[in-house]
Image (spheres, rainbow, N blue to C red):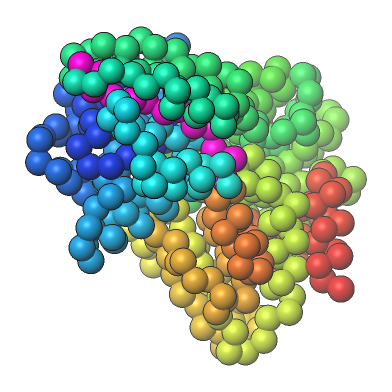
């Protein structure tokens, strides 16, 4: 249960009210973790349910509002459900056996557009006989189809098997944070200022992930603060094969780490791992064209309590204004992401450490569809500090994309 949500596969359950979505979650988890009622619309906003689904491991199930909800409030709930659909690893369409309406067809159309693997569960087979013709038609469209009775725990093993097979065959494994930058035996220097936003006694998540990955890969990992760089380099018999630093001290680190030792940042590696680094580097090119009065969207996927020197609300906006003059800067926090991005010249998103790669790619896809450039905190900071070229040197394709976008 301690596995971060950003490292868990996300399964979303979608369908009409009273189709049995909450009952199916309870059956899959073998515990009552979701409220079940005969009253239509019991589930209102998307609700996350984290548990262990063997043999996949730690997962998150999203229980969503009925896609057929009505009224002004109901339509708002539907929009919330559809927003969740865009970044699920696997979509589960739940409907009563023998029924398939424009609501379910609309969900399926959207999953196909997004390339989201889809499993259809025809629920309540205790009340109606399975429709094999309909099931065959959906299988022909690339869906896995299962018949079940969630309330009576019938067909649940088949649902689990369908989910497992879908994950193994149709979902991409997570990209490692360090990519292919490190090989066994390499020495990697991690420069980790003590972030005031980190919980007391702990490092922030990307730093912990980097340490674990390096240890797993057989590399040698040295962790220091930014005031021990010269001392550490002097003590090493041979230079490190890679230096990874916190973005907020990247300018200082680049000055103190002699070339040709490669230098990157945790946040740049997050852009590689969680999103599309080439696209994010290209998005940083849009920063070079900002002028006073332009609108910039700062977007965070978490909703932490802002600090006095908050990176997204204070530091980056101040660096932007110092370089480009007075800008109009908006803030989007948590899972909320504006539908209309057209007013913005560029979006600067956080690293996305608490969400999945598909979530980050969904945001990028939405921005690209509206013709708005997008980058992330670490790429933007390295640009604003004048060191992005050096920080992207170990990612030549991304470096090239940035240079081309600046022309």
Question: Residue 51, image x and y in percent?
Answer: 32, 24
Question: Going by the image, does 196 lie left or right of 166?
Answer: left
Query: Which image quarter holds the N terminus?
Result: top left
Magenta region: 114-126
**Can you name the residue that lies furthest to the front here?**
133
Q: Residue at x 32, y 14 (%)?
A: 156
Question: Residue 108, image x and y in percent?
Answer: 48, 41
The answer to which quarter of the image holds residue 101 is top left
Question: Residue 182, image x and y in percent?
Answer: 77, 29
Is 118 one of the magenta-colored residues? yes
In the image shown, does 264 or 69 lie closer to the viewer? 69
Is 248 one of the magenta-colored residues? no
Where 2 falls versus 40 (above or below)?
above
Question: Residue 167, image x and y in percent?
Answer: 53, 23
Total number of numbered discs in the rendering:
0
Where 145 falls versus 60 (above or below)?
above
Q: Residue at x 54, y 55 (%)?
A: 363
Q: Residue at x 20, y 63 (%)?
A: 71
Residue 267 shows up from this direction: yes
Question: Going by the image, does 122 lie left or right of 266?
Answer: left
Q: Residue at x 39, y 47 (%)?
A: 102
Query: Which image quarter holds the C terminus?
Result: bottom right
Question: Going by the image, does 290 lie left or right of 330?
Answer: right
**Can you name the residue that lies furthest to the right here?**
260
Where 32 falls versus 330 (above or below)?
above
The answer to which quarter of the image holds residue 280 is bottom right
The answer to which quarter of the image holds residue 52 is top left
In the image shown, does 149 or 225 lie closer to the viewer? 149
Question: Going by the image, does 310 lie left or right of 180?
Answer: left
Residue 4 shows up from this direction: no
């Amino acid at each position: 249960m301690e596995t971060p949500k950003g490292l868990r596969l996300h399964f979303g359950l979608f369908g009409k009210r009273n189709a049995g979505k909450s009952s199916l979650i309870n059956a899959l988890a073998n515990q009552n973790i979701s409220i079940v009622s005969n009253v239509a619309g019991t589930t209102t906003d998307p609700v996350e349910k984290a548990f262990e689904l063997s043999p996949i491991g730690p997962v998150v199930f999203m229980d969503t509002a009925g896609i057929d909800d009505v009224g002004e409030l109901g339509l708002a709930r539907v929009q919330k459900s559809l927003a969740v659909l865009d970044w699920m690893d696997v979509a589960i369409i739940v409907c009563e056996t023998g029924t398939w309406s424009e609501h379910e067809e609309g969900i399926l159309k959207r999953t196909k557009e997004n390339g989201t693997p889809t499993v259809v569960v025809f629920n309540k087979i205790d009340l109606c006989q399975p429709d094999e013709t309909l099931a065959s038609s959906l299988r022909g469209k690339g869906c896995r189809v299962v018949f079940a009775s969630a309330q009576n725990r019938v067909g649940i093993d088949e649902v689990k098997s369908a989910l497992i097979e879908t994950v193994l065959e149709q979902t991409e494994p997570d990209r490692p944070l360090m990519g292919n930058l490190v090989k066994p035996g390499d020495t990697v220097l991690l420069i980790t200022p003590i972030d005031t936003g980190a919980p007391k006694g702990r490092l922030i998540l990307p730093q912990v992930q980097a340490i674990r990955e390096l240890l797993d890969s057989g590399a040698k990992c040295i962790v220091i603060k930014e005031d021990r760089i010269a001392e550490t380099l002097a003590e090493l018999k041979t230079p490190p094969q890679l230096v990874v630093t916190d973005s907020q001290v990247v300018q200082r680190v680049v000055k103190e780490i002699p070339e040709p030792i490669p230098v990157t940042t945790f946040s740049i590696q997050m852009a590689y791992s969680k999103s599309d680094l080439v696209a994010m580097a290209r998005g940083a090119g849009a920063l070079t064209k900002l002028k006073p009065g332009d609108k910039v969207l700062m977007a965070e996927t978490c909703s932490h309590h802002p600090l006095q020197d908050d990176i997204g609300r204070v530091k980056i906006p101040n660096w932007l204004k110092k370089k480009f003059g007075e800008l109009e800067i908006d803030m989007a926090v948590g899972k909320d992401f504006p539908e209309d991005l057209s007013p913005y010249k560029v979006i600067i998103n956080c690293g996305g450490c608490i969400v999945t790669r598909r979530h980050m790619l969904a945001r990028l896809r939405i921005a690209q569809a509206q013709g708005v450039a997008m980058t992330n905190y670490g790429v933007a900071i390295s640009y604003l500090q004048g060191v992005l070229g050096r920080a992207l040197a170990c990612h030549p394709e991304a470096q090239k994309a940035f240079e081309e976008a600046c022309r």
